[in-house]
Image: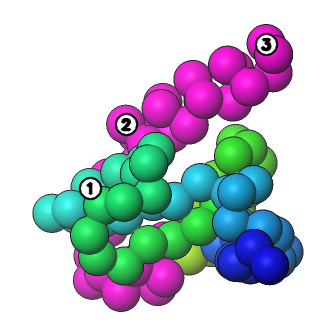
Amino acid sequence: MEAVRTCVGCRARAPRSSLVRFVARDLVLILDETATLPGRGAWLHPSLDCFHTAIQRRAFGRALRVQGQLESTNAETKLNGRVSTMSDD
């Protein structure tokens, strides 16, 4: 049985394989493409809608237990590239 995680954007439960993991390093949000970086992780559907919802709700900060504003532009750019690649398949 595959592990189930909750998307921090839409709050829907989904299998781990259908979500992407984010971690925080020095107040910078990082897309953990291999899901192996150390530390707390926040899981999200690989969609910009869920990403923007999570940013608006400040869900990443709570899920990752980070105080302060997270820099998320690089993570959004990488997620956008990942979504574009997935839609090309």
What amino acid is found at the position of numbered circle 1 in the picture? Val
Left-right relation of 31 to 51: left
Q: Residue furthest left?
A: 26
Mark number displayed over residue 77: none
Q: Quadrant where the C terminus lies?
A: top right
Disc 1: CA contacts within 10 A as few (<14), some (14-19) or many (>=20): some
Q: Position of residue 46 (x, y in %)?
A: 69, 46
Disc 2: CA contacts within 10 A as few (<14), some (14-19) or many (>=20): few
Mark number displayed over residue 28: 1
Residue 32 in view here:
yes
Tags 1 and 2 touching, CB below 8 Å: yes
Q: Is residue 8 magenta?
A: no
Which badge, 3 or 2, is on the more N-terminal residue?
Answer: 2
Q: Quadrant where the N terminus lies?
A: bottom right
Which badge, 1 or 3, is on the more N-terminal residue?
Answer: 1
Q: Which residue is mark 2?
A: 74
Label 2 SS: helix
Magenta stretch: helix, strand or loop mostly: helix
Label 1 SS: strand
Q: Position of residue 49 (x, y in %)?
A: 76, 48
| Residue 64 to residue 42: above or below | below
Q: Position of residue 25 (x, y in %)?
A: 21, 62
Mark toward the viewer: 1 or 3: 3
Q: Which residue is mark 3?
A: 88
Q: Is residue 71 magenta?
A: yes
Front residue (pair 4, 79): 4
Q: CA distance from mark 1 to mark 2?
A: 9 Å
Tags 3 and 2 touching, CB below 8 Å: no
What amino acid is found at the position of numbered circle 2 in the picture? Asn
Q: Which residues are magenta?
A: 60-89
Quadrant in the rendering for residue 27: bottom left
Front residue (pair 58, 5): 5
